[in-house]
């Protein structure tokens, strides 16, 4: 059983290349075997059906890497606002968010 | 709008209940930065502290910054005029924050992103257009302080060393 990672992005927001590079690096570093799906979201209808709350959105086994940040957010085409551990805003999820999501999913498979 | 062109003038409502006229600001300033902005965008949020520090550092030198909020508040309710007022107060912004409800000003400037800087000299002529600096995320890692460098040059009666950079940020949310 492998881990499923969904990488959803809206091309008009310029943060997705940075987030994609970060995700790839963390997959390499953690050694997590994952089936990664990269999906472009281009319409409000697509945003609605995929519960896309901003670009980029990364889910591991269906769970958002920043579940608290996604809570209560409307589906829409926008840049997503994340917050780093030091409180600064960011246009990409933090390394800790992605790493934790990957390692927790891996641990659940081993259980 | 191209470097060397005279900027379109505007009069827009400010978050404090007054109105801001670009002509009036130009009459009393040596330089004015019109910055298209909003509340929701992570790039704006990352640069906001530097917008505040630039306004503070250059206030005594005849500089004024006007942040213009043009976004469609139906798709982005956190960018409504009411939310702009709240954020301006909560964050203690020292610059004007005006609402471009019709989006006419954003269209007139051909602005596309937030934040996007248009630095004008006292004649209202565009002298610098683009990003605030080269790193929205890490203030300590900035290598090129585009707006500060342009301001230093302009206030010294010189031409900005870099007149144009690509604006980096969220797209303006058109109606």
Image (cartoon, coloured by chain):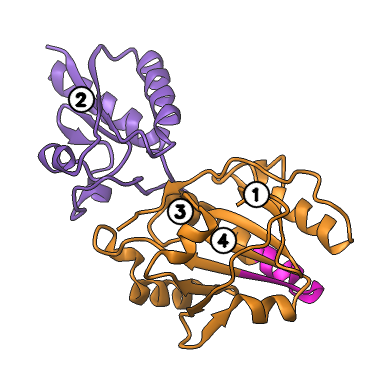
Chain colours: A purple, B orange
Between B36 and B22, which is closer to the camera in this rendering? B22
Q: CA distance from mark 3 to mark 4?
A: 24 Å
Q: Write down the chain letter for disc 2.
A: A
Q: Are marks 1 and 2 on the same chain?
A: no
Point out the tag, 1 or 4, that comes first from the N-terminus.
Answer: 1
Q: Are marks 4 and 2 on the same chain?
A: no
Q: Circles 1 and 2: CB distance less than 8 Å? A: no
Q: Nearer the viewer, mark 1 or mark 2?
A: 1
Q: Are marks 2 and 3 on the same chain?
A: yes
Residue at the spot 48% in from the left edge and 46% down from the top edge: B169
Residue B16 in the image: above or below residue B80: below
Stretch of the chain drawn in magenta: B53-65
Q: Which residue is mark 2?
A: A105
Q: Which residue is mark 1?
A: B2
The answer to whether residue B54 is left or right of residue A83 is right
Point out the tag, 2 or 3, that comes first from the N-terminus.
Answer: 3
Q: Which residue is mark 3?
A: A87
Q: Quadrant of residue B52?
A: bottom right
x and y percentages locating residue B10 in the rendered image: 54, 74
Which element carries disc 2, helix, strand or loop?
helix
Q: Circles 2 and 3: CB distance less than 8 Å? A: no
Decide: few, some or many residues near mark 1? Use Cα within 10 Å; few <14, some 14-19, many ≥20.
some
x and y percentages locating residue B35 in the rendered image: 56, 61
Q: Which residue is mark 4?
A: B35
Residue B64 in the image: above or below residue A1: below
Mark count: 4
Between A76 and B139, which is closer to the camera in this rendering? A76
Q: Nearer the viewer, mark 3 or mark 4?
A: 4
x and y percentages locating residue B154 in the rendered image: 82, 59
Q: CA distance from mark 1 to mark 2?
A: 51 Å
Q: Write down the chain letter for disc 3.
A: A
Q: Is residue B113 magenta?
A: no
């Amino acid at each position: 059983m492998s881990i499923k990672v969904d990488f959803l992005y809206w091309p008009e927001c310029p943060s997705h290349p940075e987030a994609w590079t970060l995700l790839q690096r963390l997959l390499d570093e953690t050694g997590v075997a994952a089936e990664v799906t990269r999906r472009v979201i281009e319409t409000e209808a697509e945003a609605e059906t995929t519960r896309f709350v901003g670009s980029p959105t990364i889910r591991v086994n269906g769970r958002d890497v920043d579940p608290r940040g996604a809570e209560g957010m409307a589906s829409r085409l926008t840049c997503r606002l994340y917050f780093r551990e030091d409180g600064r805003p960011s246009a990409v999820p933090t390394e800790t968010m992605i790493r934790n999501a990957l390692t927790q999913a891996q641990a659940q498979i081993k259980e | 709008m191209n470097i060397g062109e005279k900027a379109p003038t505007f009069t827009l409502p400010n978050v404090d209940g007054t109105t801001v006229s670009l002509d009036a600001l130009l009459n009393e300033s040596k330089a004015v930065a019109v910055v298209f902005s909003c509340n929701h965008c992570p790039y704006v949020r990352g640069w906001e502290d530097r917008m505040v520090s630039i306004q503070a550092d250059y206030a005594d030198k005849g500089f004024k910054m006007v942040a213009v909020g043009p976004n469609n508040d139906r798709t982005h309710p956190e960018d409504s005029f009411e939310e702009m007022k709240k954020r301006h107060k909560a964050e203690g912004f020292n610059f004007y924050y005006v609402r471009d409800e019709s989006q006419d000003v954003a269209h007139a400037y051909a602005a596309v992103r937030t934040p996007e800087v248009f630095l004008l000299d006292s004649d209202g002529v565009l002298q610098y257009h683009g990003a605030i600096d080269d790193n929205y995320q890490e203030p300590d890692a900035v290598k090129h302080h585009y707006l500060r460098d342009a301001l230093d040059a302009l206030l010294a009666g010189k031409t900005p060393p870099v007149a144009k950079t690509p604006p980096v940020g969220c797209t303006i949310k058109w109606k």
